[in-house]
Image: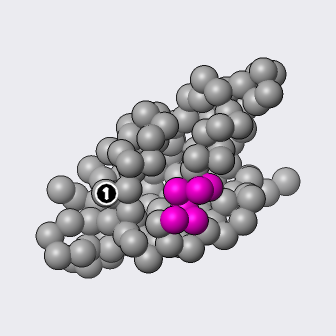
Amino acid sequence: MRPEDVLDLYETKIKLRSFDELAPLIADDAVFWFSDGSHYGMDEIRAAFERTWRKVQDEVYWLENLRWVAVSDDAASCIYAFHWKGLWDGKAFEGKGRGTTVLRREADKWKIVHEHLSHFPQ
């Protein structure tokens, strides 16, 4: 599987809203930076995803304008725009921002080792 395939699968699995589906794609020592804070390791990353899924109902999430800025035999990095919409406390909301995902080869598999999502600059 190529890094591009892992990111495509990750985008698909997020829509299932089950962290157990995402976990095999994420490195145990991963670091995720979201607008609500920095999350180190699988337990903190799981908690961040599950907290968001409890708050946002009927979520639709997608990536656009993916650009692979570095790819080697052992590491790859992609930047993109992300979008979401859903119900937050019963009210319709939507948002977008920019993201970076870094993958690392572990044995014969690619794993996400870092994700950084942020708002677009004003």
- Image: 63 above or below 35: above
Expressed as whole percent of the image width and height from the top left, the position of residue 52 reads 65, 44
Closer to the camera in the image, 70 or 9: 9
Magenta span contains residue 81:
no
Expressed as whole percent of the image width and height from the top left, the position of residue 81 reads 58, 47
Q: Is residue 83 visible?
A: no
- In the rendered image, which quarter contains the N terminus? bottom left
Q: Hey, what amino acid is under mark 1? A: Pro
Q: Is residue 121 visible?
A: yes
Residue positioned 65% across, 37% down in the render:
54
Q: Which residues are magenta?
A: 43-48
Residue 35, quarter of the rendered image:
bottom right
Residue 59, quarter of the rendered image:
top right
Name the colouring of the figure: one colour
Residue positioned 50% across, 42% down in the render:
63
Q: Main secondary structure of the magenta part?
A: helix
Judged left or right of residue 116, residue 106 is left
Judged left or right of residue 51, residue 67 is left
- SS state under label 1: helix
| Residue farthest toward the right in the current orientation of the protein | 122
- In the rendered image, which quarter contains the C terminus? bottom right
| Residue farthest toward the left in the current orientation of the protein | 108
Expressed as whole percent of the image width and height from the top left, the position of residue 3 reads 29, 60
Expressed as whole percent of the image width and height from the top left, the position of residue 85 reads 66, 29
Residue positioned 44% across, 41% down in the render:
18
- Image: 68 above or below 70: above
Closer to the camera in the image, 77 or 19: 19
Crowding at label 1, few (<14), some or many (≥20) Cα neighbours within 10 Å? some
Q: Which residue is mark 1?
A: 24
